[in-house]
Amino acid sequence: MTSAINLHGDPHVERYLETAGEDGFHWRNGTTILILFTKGRKSGQQRSHALIFREHAGAYLVVASKGGNDAPPAWFVNLEADPQVEVQIKGERFAATARVATPEEKPAMWATMVEAWPDYDNYQKKTAREIPVVVLERR
């Protein structure tokens, strides 16, 4: 069996879903993972992504960093086209609406996410693109 700490991408999503997060919810350096389900903007197919998250004021935060790449992750482009998403945390799956943090709320949210994954600051230094914090609010 693969250690959840070593899981990435599709294998991480698959193992998380198979075990209701028993494998895959807890990840590296004490982080926690949710699964974000988006609809492909071109294909219309459901896409799923394992993302580091933190709870914040009743919502869930994720960061569209793509490791500091100049292009945003595909999941972010998909949710910009259709912000109606689904989220799974452990065994609970629910509908949510995704939005980008406002300039006023982003500093506190960014700090929360950097606390969870300090490399986000390094990723921001690697790119001229402003890396967004995405707020997932239950519907």
Image (cartoon, grey):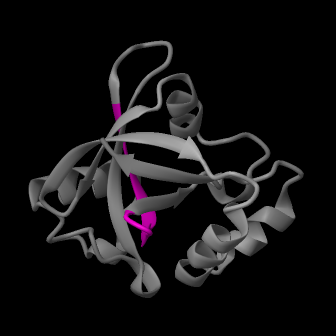
Q: In this view, does 79 lie above or below 9?
A: above
In the image: residue 56, left or right of residue 99: left
Across and down, in percent, residue 44 comes to: 38, 15
Residue 90, by quadrant, is: bottom left
Pick whichever, 7 or 67, lies toward us.
67
The residue drawn where x is 57% and y is 30% is 80
- Magenta residue span: 47-58
Residue at the spot 59% in from the left edge and 31% down from the top edge: 77
Quadrant (top left, top right, bottom left, bottom right) of the N terminus? bottom left
- Depth check: 13 or 76 in front? 76
Q: Is residue 53 magenta?
A: yes
Q: Residue at x 51, y 38 (%)?
A: 75
Q: Is residue 133 above or below residue 99?
A: below
Image coordinates of residue 114 in percent, x first then y, are 63, 77
Q: Position of residue 120 (x, y in %)?
A: 67, 70
Q: How many marks?
A: 0
**Chief SS of the magenta region:** strand
Image quadrant holding the C terminus, namely top left
Near-viewer residue (24 or 35): 35
Indicate whether residue 112 is drawn in magenta.
no
What residue lies at 89% left-to-right and 51% top-to-bottom?
Answer: 128
Quick check: 103 above or below 84?
below
